[in-house]
Amino acid sequence: MRLTRQLWISGAIIAALICALTPVQGFSQSVPLAQTPPMGWNDWYQYECTISDAIVRANADALVSTGMRAAGYTYISIDDCWQGKRDADGNIQPNGRFPDMKALADYVHSKGLKFGIYSSPGPKTCARYEGSYGHEEQDARTYARWGVDLLKYDWCSAAKVYKPEQMQAVYKKMGDALKRTGRPIVYSLCQYGLQAVWRWGASVGGNMWRTTDDIGGDYYRVSMFGFMQNGLAPYAGPGHWNDPDILQIGIGKLNHDEELTQMSLWCILAAPLQAGNDLAHMSKDTLAILTNLEVIAVDQDAKGVEGHRAWQEGPLEIWVKPLADGSKAVGLFNRGIGLLPITVRFQDIGLPESVQIRDLWARKDLGAFHGSYTATIPRHGAVMLKVK
Ligand code: GLA
């Protein structure tokens, strides 16, 4: 009898402790999201409005079978063009290419992946599909019911119904609605970097925000957007990241050296890594670039500091990102039109006079260097070093 009473009392104490330690706010409040830059896949540049349930499943399968999931890519995100009409109660329905969104999300989850979706605060998305205007709360609840883990929210036609000065409130409205669902949903702002979004994106609930217009195109567009990120580092950190848009690797408009440049720079920028290619039919070279674990580790580094341009001379640039273990990632870039030598003078970029260098693309320790290190880089190419 006494023993039963004692057991009962200890049980009550444990239960009280559990209650006290469990946050009363919604689930999402207690789950820190995007502590490192989100990694995954987004369909837009490869499929645009041909995207379908079957294509999403094929890419989810490939993300796993190619080893990309193991390398850290987890979000499978559908961009524009999935929406159909609203039903009589105003609930958004997918279009005929997506027979059952909940079943698709379940499938993505069954692969150990997360599921991303897209909408606009305007009446229409950029591709003129149904937006969330006037249905923000309802749509957030629908996404949570389907099992959505990331929402990209794209300004598009919102410009027709809102004044520019309402933009922050409009983004906060959906940010709050997502939080109220109680489901942890990464909130990805897409308004092309208008109104210096990096200054307020986190305050409206954003976990990442596009800092530029659409990146789709050749090396010149990718490099213009990538290299113009300099100066935005103070605004990025765990939970909230500058997003210079989707990786163009394996899509067909960049050559090998140009792809090395985008991957190196995006990792130094601590940018979200969203592959944009057809994962089921990529070359070995594309896969190797997307899954170099030492380069990805720079992006995902726990210190969460975005890198910056430390030196520039004509088309040659050196970028530096401090890492949690006290070492630095150093990216050397040749934006010129021919092969060029580039010399890193350690003191110029805040490094000690004597250092150990590892080449992250070659996966090779280069040894000890004193004063400087020189590499020769092809046109549009990059070298990625870890220096300690
Ligand atoms: C805008 C966005 C793109 C993409 C398209 C879809 O252009 O910036 O990233 O989402 O809309 O229509």
Image (cartoon, helix red, strand yellow):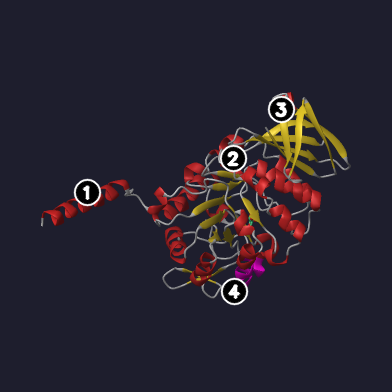
Looking at the rendered image, the disc whose residue lies closer to the viewer, 2 or 3, is: 3
Q: Quadrant of ligand 1?
A: bottom right
Looking at the rendered image, the disc whose residue lies closer to the viewer, 4 or 2, is: 4
Q: Secondary structure at mark 4?
A: loop
- Estimate the x, y position of residue 363 in percent, counting from the top left: 73, 45
- Kindly report the distance in space between the C-alpha atoms of the residues bearing marks 2 and 1: 51 Å
Label 4 sits on what residue type? Arg
Dot 2 or dot 3, earlier in sequence: 2
Label of residue 360 in the image: none
- Kindly report the distance in space between the C-alpha atoms of the residues bearing marks 4 and 1: 53 Å
Dot 4 or dot 1, earlier in sequence: 1
**For residue 130, side relative to residue 320 (left or right):** left
- Kindly report the distance in space between the C-alpha atoms of the residues bearing marks 2 and 3: 28 Å
The dominant secondary structure in magenta is helix
Quickly name the residue at label 2.
Answer: 196
Label 3 sits on what residue type? Ile
Quickly name the residue at label 3.
Answer: 349
Determine whether the beta carbon of the residue marked 1 sits less than 8 angstroms from the nearest atom of ligand 1: no
Dot 2 or dot 1, earlier in sequence: 1
Label of residue 97 in the image: 4
Dot 4 or dot 2, earlier in sequence: 4
Looking at the rendered image, the disc whose residue lies closer to the viewer, 3 or 4, is: 3
**For residue 44, side relative to residue 203 (left or right):** right
Dot 3 or dot 4, earlier in sequence: 4
Determine whether the beta carbon of the residue marked 2 sits less than 8 angstroms from the nearest atom of ligand 1: no
Residue 114 visible in the snapshot? yes
Looking at the rendered image, the disc whose residue lies closer to the viewer, 2 or 1, is: 1
- Kindly report the distance in space between the C-alpha atoms of the residues bearing marks 3 and 4: 52 Å
Q: What range of the chain is rendered magenta? A: 49-59
